């Protein structure tokens, strides 16, 4: 039974994340293994903070919350003390900030307790890795977002292939398509510009793998892309391969639209049940400017919902962050304009014509 408190709970407060010197009220209610987990990662890039509910001279509850920068969610790592009070405080805190979603990692909470607080269990990936075996989500606008499977890329360069595989797994274009490393590497091999997947090559590979799926490439530049890091010699032969991909697109009937995909256009396509593979920079969300493919598969008020096939375990990032990830429209608009001569690259995959 929870201890009786003579003083009513006060409004939640935000406390800085200071693992070198946790506040005494927190140490009083938090198990040692929980504080050890909170301290184990370098969470500084994900705005860590403690949301606490004061009660008398102590705290009734507290939660460590984090989130990737420029996103529209909040993640609970753990709640300590009186759990329902702590979760309600975090949900209220997220609503006040206009966020779309709260997630809850399942280190110390089970499905029944999470459901009682209004959370739904997420489908765990085949191998959670360093993350929790379970996680939960609560959408704050009472929206219904269909959940694709989550799969983490197994290399540093197969993000494009993974986003295409996850998109097709969700649509049922191939009901028995394996979502595993052989499928990932096989599709990457057909799409790669060594080692990256540029938009035209990725669109061509999708058409080859799923001929019944409508595919369109949207790329508002005619020059070769994703080659800024290469030497002059490397740029030359990679450019040859990108021109060959354009030839293949023409032969296979894959349209290449030279207009820039707008965020309204992206939201419209996703809202119609299509999928958009979108090239973004990780500078905003992870702190390093690396081109990266994500899957846009749903929209909610003010945000687009992504599947990100990569997460940074060293920063306390887990599959719970990368799965059903809402990113505010303006943030997604900014992070999907690449290089100092900005371009936007995307592959739109329509609904497949299913076999009878």
Image (cartoon, rainbow, N blue to C red):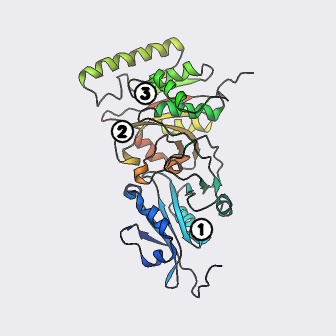
Viewer can see residue 257:
no
Q: Residues within 10 Å of mark 1 (few under 14, many from 20)?
A: some
Task: Determine the CA span between mark 3 and mark 2.
Answer: 13 Å
Answer yes or no: do the residues labelled 3 and 2 have beta carbons within 8 Å?
no
The percent position of residue 303, horizontal first and vertical second, equals: 53, 48
Q: Which mark is residue 290?
A: 2
Viewer can see residue 205:
yes
Looking at the image, which is closer to me, 334 or 354? Answer: 354
The percent position of residue 201, horizontal first and vertical second, equals: 45, 22
Q: Which mark is residue 197?
A: 3
The percent position of residue 117, horizontal first and vertical second, equals: 65, 63
What is the count of numbered marks?
3
* Helix, strand or loop at mark 3: loop
Q: Residues within 10 Å of mark 2 (few under 14, many from 20)?
A: few
* Helix, strand or loop at mark 2: loop
Residue matched to label 1: 88
* Helix, strand or loop at mark 1: helix
Residue 249 vs 109, above or below: the answer is: above
Looking at the image, which is closer to me, 142 or 17? Answer: 17
Q: Is residue 121 left or right of residue 40?
A: right
The residue located at (56%, 31%) in the rendering is: 165
């Amino acid at each position: 039974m929870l201890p009786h408190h003579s003083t009513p709970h006060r409004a939640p407060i935000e406390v800085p994340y200071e693992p070198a010197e946790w506040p005494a009220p927190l140490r009083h209610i938090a198990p040692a293994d929980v504080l050890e987990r909170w301290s184990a990662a370098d969470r500084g890039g994900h705005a860590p903070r403690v949301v606490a509910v004061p009660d008398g001279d102590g705290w009734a509850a507290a939660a460590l919350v984090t989130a990737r920068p420029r996103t529209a969610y909040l993640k609970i790592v753990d709640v300590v003390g009186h759990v329902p009070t702590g979760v309600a405080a975090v949900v209220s805190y997220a609503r006040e900030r206009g966020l779309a979603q709260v997630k809850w990692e399942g280190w110390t909470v089970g499905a029944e307790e999470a459901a009682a607080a209004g959370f739904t269990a997420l489908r765990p990936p085949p191998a959670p890795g360093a993350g929790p075996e379970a996680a939960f989500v609560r959408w704050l606008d009472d929206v219904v977002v269909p959940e694709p499977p989550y799969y983490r890329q197994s290399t540093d360069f197969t993000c494009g292939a993974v986003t295409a595989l996850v998109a097709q797994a969700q649509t049922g274009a191939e009901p028995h398509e394996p979502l595993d490393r052989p499928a990932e590497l096989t599709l990457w091999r057909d799409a790669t510009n060594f080692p990256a997947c540029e938009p035209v090559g990725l669109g061509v590979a999708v058409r080859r793998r799923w001929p019944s799926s409508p595919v369109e490439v949207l790329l508002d530049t005619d020059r070769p892309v994703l080659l800024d890091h290469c030497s002059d010699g490397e740029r030359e032969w990679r450019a040859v391969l990108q021109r060959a991909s354009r030839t293949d697109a023409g032969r296979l009937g894959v349209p290449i639209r030279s207009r820039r995909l707008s965020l309204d256009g992206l939201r419209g396509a996703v809202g119609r049940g299509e999928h958009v593979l979108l090239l973004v920079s990780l500078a905003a969300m992870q702190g390093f400017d690396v081109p990266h493919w994500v899957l846009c598969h749903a929209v909610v008020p003010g945000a687009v919902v992504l599947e990100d096939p990569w997460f940074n375990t060293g920063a306390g990032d887990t599959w719970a962050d990368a799965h059903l990830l809402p990113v505010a429209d303006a943030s997604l608009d900014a992070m999907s304009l690449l290089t100092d001569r900005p371009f936007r690259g995307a592959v739109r995959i329509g609904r497949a014509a299913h076999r009878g």
